[in-house]
Image: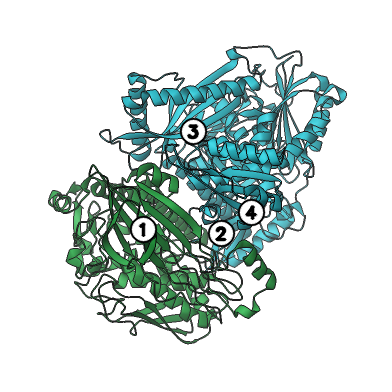
Chain colours: A cyan, B green
Amino acid sequence: MPQQDPPRPVRIAVDIGGTFTDLQVLDARHGEVRAWKTPTTPEDPSDGLLTGVREAAERFGFALSDVGLLLHGTTIATNAVLERRLARGALVTTQGFEDVLEITRHVRRDVYGLAPDPFPCLIPRDRRLGVRERLRADGSVEVPLDLGTLLQRLDALQPEAIAISLLHAYANPAHERALRAAILAAHPGLPVSLSSDISPEIREYERSSTTVLNALLVPVVRDYLRRLAARLGRDGFAPRIFLVQSNGGVCSLETAAEQPARLLLSGPSGGALAASRLAGELAQPNLVAVDMGGTSYDVSVVQEGRVALVTQGEVDGLPVRLPMVEMRTIGAGGGSIAAVEAGGRLVVGPRSAGARPGPVAYGRGGTEPTVTDANLALGRLDPDFFLGGAMQLDMGAAHAALAALGARLGLDGAAAAEGMLALTNAALAAAVRLSLFEKGLHPRDFALLSFGGAGGLHAVAVAEEMGMEQVILPREPGTLSAYGILFSDLVQDIARSRLFTLDEAALPGLAALIAELRAEAAARLARDGVAEADRALSVAADMRYHGQAFELLVPWGDVLAPDATALAYLAARFHATHRQRFSYAAEEEAVEIVTLRVTATGRLPRPAPASPAKADRPARKGARKIFAGGAWVEAGVWDREALGAADVLHGPAIIEEAFATHVLPQGWTARLGAAGAIIARKDAAA
Amino acid sequence: MTTPETKLGPIDIEVIRNALTAAAAEMDVTVWRTSRSTIVRELLDYSTAVFDAEGWNLAQSARIPGHLNSMSAALRTLLSDHVRAEDWGPDDVVITNDPYCGGQHLPDIIAFRPVFHEGARIAYVGTLCHHIDVGGLVAGSYPSKATEIFQEGLRIPPVKLIEKGVRNEAVWAIIRQNIRKPDLLLGDLQSQIASLEVGRQALARLALRFGAAAMLEAGRRILDMSEAAMRAALAEMPDGTYDFTDRLDDDGIDLGREIRLHVRLTIAGDTALVDLSGCSPQVQGPTNATLASSNAAVMFALMSAALGGGRGGGLAMNAGCYRPITVVAPEGLVVNARAPAPVAHRVAVTHRLLNAMYGALHQAVPERIPAAYYGCSYVTTFQTVRADARRDVLVEIEIGGSGATPHKDGVSAYASGMHNNSNIPVEMIEAQMPLTIMRYALLPGTGGDGTWRGGLGLVREWRIDSARCFFTANMDRFFSQPYGLAGGLPASTGRLELLRDGKATPIPPKSDNVPLVQGDIVRLSTSGGGGFGAPGERDPALAARDRRMGYLA
């Protein structure tokens, strides 16, 4: 498969975050991977993107015309939803069901709350229009489509985008397509999203929610892509551009413009991609990947080298039913604030000081102590080497805030700070434990892969708390997400709900549906310019026992026309998966397929990166006191960029690099491993 | 119990408290992961909790308000009346579903197991699951016409289901013989036992780190802290005695005879006295509750009011919160029924008791309390019978609107109060059953008018596509309206109708096995929430928006 990058040898991955735009640059001429960071420009993120590319070009010595591939992770869709900068839309649905979007699925989250807010609903009642029509679950027509006065009503509303979501449209798209044709005839060019295109799966609320999100995002994302395209061509900068989706793959600009909902929740994709890549490079197939930044802690699981995906996620309380990386997020990060609550309880987070005002030590007006302040006061962070020395931290202010907190608990400042870290580490460990536990997995079979700006300060303590014996601290932990994106492939997911009972009578129907989905997948890859040799298709099914109300995703492999053997294989996999996740299998019960999925992968050329070079300076920088276990102890301080294969670090030790600091407690030993990662292991019990 | 010296600081206490909550969460995941029935898996009708060595609730998984704050009472009842703690070993699991031994209604089976460390009992762990069927008059064990508990299903007295680690086979056999879906029930019971083991392991890990004495001390201090927080919240409320009465329609047997739920709440300093002596005597039909159920409603009302509708999450919910609260409820009343009264529909009593509690609390803390929510679990059961005699069963629980608050409108179609369930997608029902949902919509005009309007109820219509169908309902608030507060108007009542041959006729809200035929349509209209404040003072802009959105009749 290895294939040369076209004449333009540079590939760039860009991950645009709230504060920084991270870049990773791979130059195929020497195989080196380099990282760069530049401030994000929220008004038009493509501005900062271009600035970052120009800076990197200058710094790393390539021309803009050398860039052949730009892989682009963006939160533009997610931010548009969070900030409600969305198009003014209308929803067309089956008459009698206009309120499904507002009724939602009922279950309340805040059990004790007395002043609830409604679930978010992006299209209000006066812009939800019912049409007379009715399909059955098998796709047959009970009531033919009757447009009635729909077009006149739409004229009165003047929508900028339209979502169409009819009952059972996953089984038969005919009515939705007829509606689109009629609307486009009257309003050429109006963005129209069909539920049968966007999320052709059973369950009307989730399908409608996803389709509405998509429709309202089309104008937003189109505008952005237009601005981005306008920047191409200058100074020879004309790479092929792909956008990162929530499913851990990338898609073309055309796909992104039509199905922008696929960009929602793509944030974790990069980190998860990096984790699965590192799982391979480190020959460590089972990893828990944790990303700790200023406000949140994201946990995902890599099992047997593959990132766990789910078929539905949520943005701002709105379901998005598209495949995405499975992630557990808790509100704990460097900016988490400590406070004393009613009854004298110390709590840390979920309130966060964020970047503004930030921790007390930033000196930007923060007054409440944060986790970063605790790490600073206890010697884990160096006030003169924060962000590689780019920012001076105010140690005195941190101490004062912690002393005030401690006074309310009857503790001195150091004890209060260590208490904050103990509570934080326990909360992080509980999140990791639950992520494994709910899948029937055990921490002892996993290594902890920790990244993000604050990850290394807590990783080993969290592993210790859970009885995990190995911690992996990858290179460039602050831009790991961009590193993951750098090696991504084109991935298209196509799904269709149709209820099959798993027996041989279902074979012809299954074969027909698989053929249909595969043909569509192949067409999409062809449209994105993927050569046949670079395509891979795989089939999966959402399955359950008859009578169950939820499904399990079961991979089926590269199935063409299934026979009895293939069916038996699928059933066996379902029973086995069910047994692992739910502790039992009911092999005598009828098994159903609810949804079939085809994942089409278009492999992008993948040059092998060279190993990073080590900096030519002493690895050991010195020593300083850190507070651990109620006392100040001496810890060696190491320079990550200068570490070599021969260096062996015994805890207590501190490892510093430009954008992160790592703590190695007593009883742990660390060495440099493959791919430049630091591997920390628990010492054998004496 | 003596208190050995420990050196626990405030940090250790909080670490232990968080670990106990995490243990309840792991137990919760275990039930979800290993249970068999959809009632547990989809409706999530179960709870898990950790208790101290005396049976006081330390931590719980937050799911169903009706379960929260009732399990501790059950365990305390077991310990005081049924099982001697000295005879309850580390490998013994005790279960019961008997409302008259601390339970709620027969489908809820509660299981407990003690946790020991170095020979000392340091805690109990417990699980509660609503099981799909425990025998009795009708499938699902939810008959609306039972007149004694013996008709409602199998009563399991407190008994060791597992003794010294060995299954008590006689008990398993008796259960198996008396229920309709033994594989599902026994499967779910297994998952309760597995969950207890997970909880036991989590606590054992903690005890290994901190020691038995520290665990006991931490438990005591955790409860003390919540007690202190609860007392502080009560002390903020003005002293006084506050009366309120709300009503249930009837018991389904003696039709049209109201059931009175009267609350006399006295706030004195940092304590609350809740006197329920003014409630109606127990009734013939299953609209009765045992004290455990009624207590759960009272505690939920006071704990939610203490939180003040989201005034910060400082209050750790546990048995410490119960200490400043005294409940007076003489036996023989609808809120403390005497055996063998039927109790299957106890949820109706707790909904209405909660409505009455909030009515009284409104007089004490008017800034925090919303007007009445719909106050009913709209349970419908369709048993379809196809021409080839094949039968399918659909159970749905619908909801109505929440009450307007002192500062905002109520929420339309919002799961409120004592229950918290999901609806079932129209497409899922139609893909599996000979039923067609004709309409699922908000119901304009059902929210009580006011400065702030109550949330809207909804309408759902089921068309029967099978040859025959038997329909069962168990509902309330068809006569007594959800109240408004501070001059706000009450919300609409519910309605249940049969549409046949173009004519609508009412179906009684408490009906067992109504025979239906192909083409019949059942229409349910649920209550909205009450309004808050005088309607004349409503912001004209909001009124205009309501008209534009079609929220008004």
In x, y percent, where is residue A653? 61, 38
Left or right: residue B270 compared with residue B392 = right
Picture quarter containing residue A194?
top right
Residue highlighted by disc 4: A127
The residue under label 3 is: A496
Mark 4 Cα shell of 10 Å, populated few (<14), some (14-19), many (≥20): many
- Between the C-alphas of marks 1 and 4, the distance is 34 Å
Q: Are marks 4 and 3 in contact (CB under 8 Å)?
A: no
**Label 1 secondary element:** loop
Going by the image, does B178 lie left or right of B346?
left
Q: Nearer the viewer, residue A45 or B273?
A: A45
How crowded pointer 1 is (Cα within 10 Å; few <14, some 14-19, many 20+) is rated as few
**Marks 4/3: CA distance?**
28 Å
Circle nearer the viewer, 2 or 3:
3
Res. A182 mark: none
The kind of residue on which mark 3 rests is Arg
| Residue B127 visible, this orientation | no
Residue labelled with disc 1: B501
Tell me which chain the residue with mark 1 is part of. B
